[in-house]
Image (tube, helix red, strand yellow):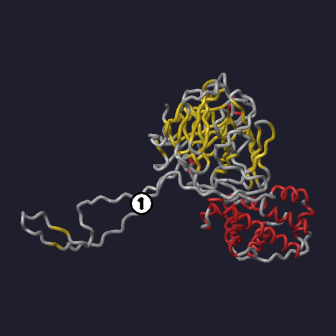
């Protein structure tokens, strides 16, 4: 195969031919992708190049097209066939780039060093044609897989509107296939809190005169100059706030394990901020099957009283109307224990599920829920918010809850579909790179394929039901659609367990490039 050095120099030469306004954006995208092992776009890239999040992915798509065209033109000029040149360009900016990130330490360091140098000159004319001739299947497969715009987000989220009679409700609509929706800028969920004024301490400000002790009545107090003092040491910089703790786990085949035993979980579907802590990195998420349809998940090193857990069914094997909720979540030393209950409309049910837990911050958590208004049986009004919102029922009640709109929550009994009060938790993702250019296709009644263009496959899939019609949607599959995207399959049923066309929201969660990234505002609603 073409060597690492040749690949890097090809990309560097091509970036030099990109218009100046996009050149640095593309260079940083390539460098960060090789450094981190995942395509870096969205908020992560915007923070480095100081480009608005709403613009960065659109500009990156232009930069990638221009870079690909530059690679193709250069190779054709050297004598490569047009078809081979174009295929190599797709491979170079797709699987080839990720292969660089997977090299051993010295080789990856050498590739990064080359990326930071000036563009070189490739002397081997026709090398790509030779590569394509020797590896035709690799080139074709890689080119097809890399055909999409590249992107990867901390949380990719898209709200999908399925055919539904309730047209009054509002949500973020997925763009038609092949079109990218303009990102919608919104106000923060919570208002900015001004810095509190410092109360007087009785001490004069340095260098200012002050009044002597209170004089007798009728006597004017003399003005006393301040005594000379040594220069005050500079104030210490405030300690940075502690990083938010969060983690997730995908309970797949483990859901059928014997009752009672606490067993470690492994695999790609498990991650948490504890893995960045040298003292906690070797610890495992554990799962205990407590009873039929009841599980306890232990997430190590993320204990937080102010956190929230979300759970969603992830399995085709589940009965049509099986859903899961959180009975309770509580710290246990350094760990967080989350008890999950799953049931159908008639009985508890064992099923696989995805679970996500995130700690809030002082500005994100509203434990008194004063902003939440109870509007009737099973109805709650929440302040407007932007981004992606997910609601999970809490407690022992047999209920499901869904987001009616961006400001209203509805809960109903699993068995009957009637409105029912319930404890619940609502989390919203904001100030991250939200996807609003997803595509959806209905495969059958209640079954949808949701495409995340430019998002590599995540670890867990979270789905929340939208709208006032009682029902339940769950994610059943998450696969890579080549290097350029991810395909999620969502299944929706009504209260009777029959396939139904419902509105839903989808979020893909994966380990972050920047560990300080967190989950959005968290609302905690006490039981009614």
Crowding near pointer 1: few (<14 within 10 Å), some, many (20+)? few
Residue 17, how many percent across, how many down?
Answer: 76, 75
Determine the image quadrant of residue 72: bottom right
Residue 334, how many percent across, how many down?
Answer: 50, 41
Q: Residue at x 76, y 46 (%)?
A: 479
The front one of 284 and 525 is: 525
Q: Residue at x 80, y 64 (%)?
A: 92
- Left or right, 1 with reference to 168: right
> Is residue 331 in view?
no
- Left or right, 233 with reference to 421: left
> Is residue 482 in view?
yes
The front one of 262 and 186 is: 186
Q: Residue at x 66, y 46 (%)?
A: 507
Report the residue that reaches farthest toward the top. 346
Residue 113, how many percent across, how many down?
Answer: 68, 70
Q: Residue at x 66, y 35 (%)?
A: 469
The front one of 282 and 145 is: 145
Task: Quarter of the image for the N terminus: give it.
Answer: bottom right
- Left or right, 304 with reference to 61: left
Residue 257, how many percent across, how many down?
Answer: 68, 28
Determine the image quadrant of residue 139: bottom right
Q: Which residue is mark 1?
A: 238
Vertical arrangement, residue 301 with respect to residue 456, above or below: above
- Dot 1 falls on a residue whose secondary structure is loop
Vertical arrangement, residue 150 with respect to residue 332, above or below: below
Q: Give the number of callouts.
A: 1
């Amino acid at each position: 195969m073409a060597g690492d050095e040749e690949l890097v120099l090809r990309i560097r030469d091509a970036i030099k031919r990109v218009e100046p306004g996009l050149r640095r954006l593309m260079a940083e995208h390539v460098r960060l992708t090789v450094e981190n092992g995942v395509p870096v776009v969205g908020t992560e890239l915007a923070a480095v190049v100081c480009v608005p999040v709403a613009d960065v992915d659109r500009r990156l798509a232009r930069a990638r097209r221009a870079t690909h065209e530059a690679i193709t033109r250069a190779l054709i000029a050297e004598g490569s066939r047009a078809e081979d040149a174009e295929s190599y360009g797709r491979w170079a900016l797709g699987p080839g780039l990720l292969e660089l990130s997977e090299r051993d330490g010295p080789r990856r360091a050498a590739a990064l060093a080359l990326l930071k140098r000036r563009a070189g000159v490739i002397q081997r004319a026709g090398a790509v044609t030779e590569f394509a001739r020797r590896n035709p299947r690799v080139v074709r497969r890689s080119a097809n897989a890399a055909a999409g715009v590249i992107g990867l987000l901390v949380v990719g989220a898209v709200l999908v509107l399925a055919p539904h009679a309730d047209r009054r409700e509002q949500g973020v609509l997925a763009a038609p296939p092949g079109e990218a929706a303009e990102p919608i800028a919104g106000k923060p969920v919570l208002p900015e809190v001004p810095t509190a004024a410092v109360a007087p301490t009785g001490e004069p400000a340095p260098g200012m005169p002050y009044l002597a002790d209170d004089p007798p009545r009728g006597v004017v107090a003399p003005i006393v100059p301040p005594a000379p003092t040594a220069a005050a040491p500079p104030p210490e910089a405030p300690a940075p706030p502690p990083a938010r703790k969060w983690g997730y786990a995908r309970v797949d085949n483990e859901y059928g394990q014997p009752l009672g035993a606490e067993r470690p979980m492994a695999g790609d579907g498990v991650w948490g901020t504890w893995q960045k802590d040298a003292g906690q990195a070797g610890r495992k998420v554990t799962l205990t099957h407590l009873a039929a349809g009841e599980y306890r998940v232990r997430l190590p090193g993320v204990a937080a009283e102010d956190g929230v857990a979300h759970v969603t069914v992830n399995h085709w094997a589940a009965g049509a109307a099986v859903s899961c909720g959180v009975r309770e979540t509580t710290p246990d030393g350094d760990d967080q224990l989350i008890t999950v209950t799953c049931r159908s409309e008639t009985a508890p049910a064992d099923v696989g599920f995805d679970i996500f837990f995130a700690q809030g911050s002082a500005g994100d958590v509203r434990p008194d829920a004063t902003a939440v208004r109870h509007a009737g049986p099973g109805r709650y009004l929440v302040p407007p918010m932007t981004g992606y919102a997910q609601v999970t029922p809490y407690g022992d009640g047999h209920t499901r809850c869904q987001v009616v709109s961006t400001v209203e929550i509805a809960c109903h009994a699993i068995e009957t579909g009637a409105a029912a009060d319930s404890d619940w938790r609502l989390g919203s993702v904001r100030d991250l790179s939200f996807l609003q250019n997803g595509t959806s296709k209905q495969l059958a009644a209640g079954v949808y394929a949701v495409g995340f263009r430019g998002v590599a496959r995540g670890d867990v899939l979270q789905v929340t039901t939208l709208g006032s019609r009682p029902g339940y949607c769950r994610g059943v599959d998450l696969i890579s659609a080549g290097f350029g995207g991810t395909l999620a399959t969502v299944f929706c049923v009504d209260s009777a367990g029959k396939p139904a066309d419902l509105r839903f929201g989808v979020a893909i969660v994966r380990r972050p490039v920047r560990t300080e990234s967190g989950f959005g505002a968290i609302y905690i609603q006490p039981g009614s």
